[in-house]
Image (cartoon, rainbow, N blue to C red):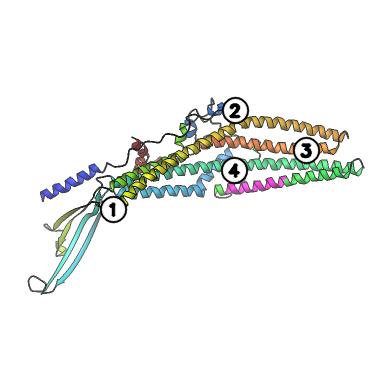
């Protein structure tokens, strides 16, 4: 009996020692398939890469959205969206789902202990009993034991646990990415509403002006000073402005619908913006010197987590070539009488180790090959996510590098067209020029002012886009800041795997 106990204890110790080993290949992060610095050229403003007084690179990642957005109404709307948005809620539930799957996989490392109570009664006929008489036997059992506990000598279960943990971490990064997307969408929609409000107000002012011009033209026609064609041209200008106002009213309504969808409910009227030019712009950020900050974007981190999961699955596939050792053990008490179930001398124990050695199973070879191909696929996805991130930042930098020049030129153009319109109106009133010159000036003024609003919107949106594509915009809630032991282990996994 003493020898059996020593054997059992030795197996448990070996299981605990071997349980920390895996056959997964050493993880090496793939090199970034992008330049180490941001693109340069005439289209790029060097101050957007590194600007004194603005959060740069790493600082932008840690800049909370409440600090980035300076408009109080917008901040309140974002808070409502983060509380009620269904897409974000689904992403949060997905994180919890994969967290529980990880816990299930992790529990396979430990034996499943079950207790049981049993009673049985058996009658043996006389011709089958050893005594030649009928025998009735009763048995009562109380037991505690583990059934088919696989001892993870070769790290198969641990590799599967690591893969499940990386899948869980990938969904956590996906949730952070979803939060950034929701914040960005709310901010963009808020600006679109303000822009549409601006254009509607602008068209209403123009319609009033065009109607006033129409009345003057009509009076001149009634006096026989001009032809009917000028009256028709003036009336058509009013109709065009009314059509433009209707288009922007439609855009305004659709933007409000989009914002309601993002908020998950009605928009508080007091939080709607008025005009675009009256908004407080977001804080300026710069991309920093190095493009290495893209490795910390949630989507890039999620791609790396999936790569780490594929790497761990290779370890599980390799371990399938080796024997599986399982143990079934039990300890309990048995008696022919219920009253004697827990009396001295009624105890029993048993253990039964089992070794299963794969000899011929083509699925093992195919599984190993498939796991290596899966890792190459994940490497490709990881590199693709980095390249996509670099392109997004480069595009935003190109827009920011030229939008100020466009905006300044458009402001000058609007001032020039406004002056032209005033002169054309004066010349028409003085009967120096015909209505055609005034009509052309009115058209140019309306188009130029609408373009100015569009460029102002583009500048505001580009500031938000740069913050978003750098990976800023998410922050943990107080509840998430309290790490559970499983979460702490999960967070340390990438660093452990990289060593």
Quarter of the picture containing the C terminus is top left
Q: Is residue 98 visible?
A: yes
Nearer the observer, disc 4 or disc 1?
A: 1
The residue to which callout 1 is attached is 361
The residue to which callout 2 is attached is 42
Quadrant of res 429: top right
The residue to which callout 3 is attached is 442
Mark 4–mark 3 Cα distance, whole angstroms, equals 30 Å
Mark 4–mark 2 Cα distance, whole angstroms, equals 31 Å
Nearer the observer, disc 4 or disc 2?
A: 2
| Residue 464 image point, x, y percent | 56, 36
Q: Residue at x 36, y 48 (%)?
A: 370
Lower sequence index among marks 4 and 2: 2
| Residue 438 image point, x, y percent | 81, 37
Range of the magenta residues?
244-260
376 in relation to 146, above or below: above
| Residue 453 image point, x, y percent | 67, 37
In terms of secondary structure, where does tag 4 sit?
helix
Query: Depth check: 3 or 317 in front?
Result: 317
Mark 4–mark 1 Cα distance, whole angstroms, equals 57 Å
Q: Residue furthest right?
A: 224
Mark 1–mark 2 Cα distance, whole angstroms, equals 62 Å
Tell me if label 1 and label 2 are in contact, CB under 8 Å: no
- The main secondary structure of the magenta stretch is helix
In terms of secondary structure, where does tag 3 sit?
helix
* Mark 4 Cα shell of 10 Å, populated few (<14), some (14-19), many (≥20): many
Nearer the observer, disc 1 or disc 2?
A: 1
* Mark 1 Cα shell of 10 Å, populated few (<14), some (14-19), many (≥20): few
The residue to which callout 4 is attached is 189
Q: Is residue 69 visible?
A: no
């Amino acid at each position: 009996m003493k020898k059996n106990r020593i054997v059992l204890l030795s197996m448990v110790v070996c299981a605990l020692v071997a349980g920390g080993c895996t056959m997964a290949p050493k993880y090496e992060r793939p090199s970034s398939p992008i330049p180490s610095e941001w693109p340069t050229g005439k289209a790029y403003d060097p101050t957007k890469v590194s600007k004194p007084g603005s959060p740069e690179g790493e600082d932008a990642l840690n800049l909370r959205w409440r600090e980035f957005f300076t408009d109080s109404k917008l901040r309140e709307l974002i808070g409502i969206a983060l509380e009620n948005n269904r897409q974000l809620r689904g992403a949060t539930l997905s994180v919890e789902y994969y967290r529980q799957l990880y816990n299930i996989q992790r529990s396979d490392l430990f034996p499943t202990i079950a207790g049981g109570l049993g009673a049985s009664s058996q009658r043996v006929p006389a011709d089958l009993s050893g005594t030649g008489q009928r025998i009735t036997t009763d048995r009562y059992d109380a037991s505690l034991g583990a059934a088919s506990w696989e001892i993870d000598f070769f790290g198969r279960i641990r590799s599967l646990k690591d893969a499940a943990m990386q899948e869980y971490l990938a969904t956590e990064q996906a949730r952070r990415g979803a939060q950034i997307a929701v914040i960005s969408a709310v901010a963009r929609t808020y600006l679109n509403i303000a822009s549409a409000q601006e254009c509607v107000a602008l068209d209403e002012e123009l319609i009033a002006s065009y109607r006033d011009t129409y009345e003057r033209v009509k009076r001149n026609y009634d006096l026989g000073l001009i032809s009917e064609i000028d009256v028709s041209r003036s009336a058509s200008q009013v109709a065009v402005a009314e059509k433009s106002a209707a288009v922007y009213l439609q855009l305004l309504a659709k933007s409000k619908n989009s914002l309601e969808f993002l908020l998950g409910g009605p928009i508080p009227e007091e939080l709607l913006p008025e005009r675009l030019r009256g908004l407080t712009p977001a804080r300026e950020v710069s991309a920093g010197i190095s493009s290495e900050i893209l490795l910390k974007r949630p989507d890039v981190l999620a791609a790396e987590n999936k790569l780490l999961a594929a790497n761990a699955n290779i370890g599980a596939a390799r371990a399938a070539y080796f024997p599986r050792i399982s143990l079934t053990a039990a300890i309990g008490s048995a008696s022919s009488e219920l009253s004697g179930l827990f009396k001295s001398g009624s105890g029993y124990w048993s253990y039964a180790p089992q070794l299963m050695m794969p000899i011929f199973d083509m699925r093992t070879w195919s599984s190993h090959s498939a796991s290596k191909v899966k890792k190459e696929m994940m490497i490709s996805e990881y590199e693709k996510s980095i390249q996509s991130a670099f392109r997004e930042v480069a595009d935003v930098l190109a827009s920011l590098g030229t939008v100020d020049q466009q905006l300044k030129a458009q402001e000058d153009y609007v001032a020039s067209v406004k002056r032209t319109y005033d002169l054309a109106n004066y010349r028409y009133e003085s009967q120096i020029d015909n209505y055609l010159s005034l009509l052309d000036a009115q058209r140019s003024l309306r188009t130029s002012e609408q373009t100015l609003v569009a460029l102002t919107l583009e500048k505001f949106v580009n500031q938000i886009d740069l913050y978003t594509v750098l990976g800023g915009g998410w922050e943990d809630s107080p509840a998430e800041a309290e790490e559970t032991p499983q979460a702490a282990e999960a967070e340390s996994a990438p660093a452990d795997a990289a060593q």
